């Protein structure tokens, strides 16, 4: 076996041993991407809920204000 053949054999052996590790890292990368997307969607949902809550709070405040104005004009 020549030095070149020996190096090629060692190269194939290392590739065979490292391939499962590389595949595992690819899986981890995909899972991290999915988690980042989920976190981003959750953050957007929370912001929507907060915005919706603010909208409802503002609507209730306006309704209360209108009710107070109505009471004031009704009692005059």
Image (tube, rainbow, N blue to C red):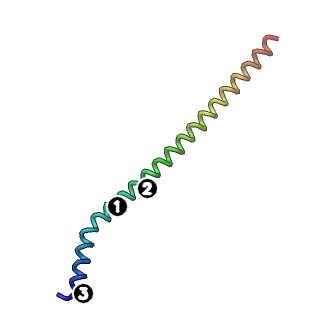
Residue underneath mark 2: 33
Nearer to the camera, 76 or 4 = 4
Report how far apart the C-alphas of labels 3 and 2 lie in the structure.
Answer: 41 Å
Residue 73 percent location from the top left of the image? 80, 16
Residue 57 percent location from the top left of the image? 63, 29
Density class for disc 1 (Cα within 10 Å; few <14, some 14-19, many ≥20) is few
Residue 24 percent location from the top left of the image? 31, 60
**Horizontal placement of 37 versus 56: left or right?**
left
Q: Determine the secondary structure under disc 2.
A: helix
**Mark closest to the chain's N terminus, 2 or 1:** 1
Does 49 appear above or below 35? above
Density class for disc 2 (Cα within 10 Å; few <14, some 14-19, many ≥20) is few
| Quadrant where the image shows the C terminus | top right
Residue underneath mark 3: 4
Does 28 appear above or below 52? below
Q: Determine the secondary structure under disc 3.
A: helix
- Residue farthest toward the top in the current orientation of the protein: 75
**Horizontal placement of 68 versus 57: left or right?**
right
Nearer to the camera, 33 or 15 = 15
Residue 53 percent location from the top left of the image? 59, 33
Residue underneath mark 1: 25
Is label 3 in contact with label 1 (beta carbons under 8 Å)?
Answer: no
Q: Nearer the viewer, mark 3 or mark 2?
A: 3
The image quarter in which residue 63 lies = top right
Report how far apart the C-alphas of labels 2 and 1 lie in the structure.
Answer: 12 Å
Report how far apart the C-alphas of labels 3 and 1 lie in the structure.
Answer: 30 Å
- Residue farthest toward the bottom in the current orientation of the protein: 2
Q: Nearer the viewer, mark 2 or mark 1?
A: 1
**Mark closest to the chain's N terminus, 3 or 2:** 3
Nearer to the camera, 75 or 54 = 54
Q: Residue at x 50, y 49 (%)?
A: 40
């Amino acid at each position: 076996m020549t030095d070149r053949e020996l190096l090629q054999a060692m190269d194939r052996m290392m590739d065979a041993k490292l391939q499962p590790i590389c595949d595992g890292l690819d899986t981890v990368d995909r899972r991290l991407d999915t988690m980042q997307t989920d976190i981003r969607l959750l953050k957007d949902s929370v912001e929507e809920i907060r915005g919706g809550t603010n909208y409802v709070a503002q609507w209730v405040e306006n309704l209360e204000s209108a009710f107070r104005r109505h009471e004031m004009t009704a009692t005059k």
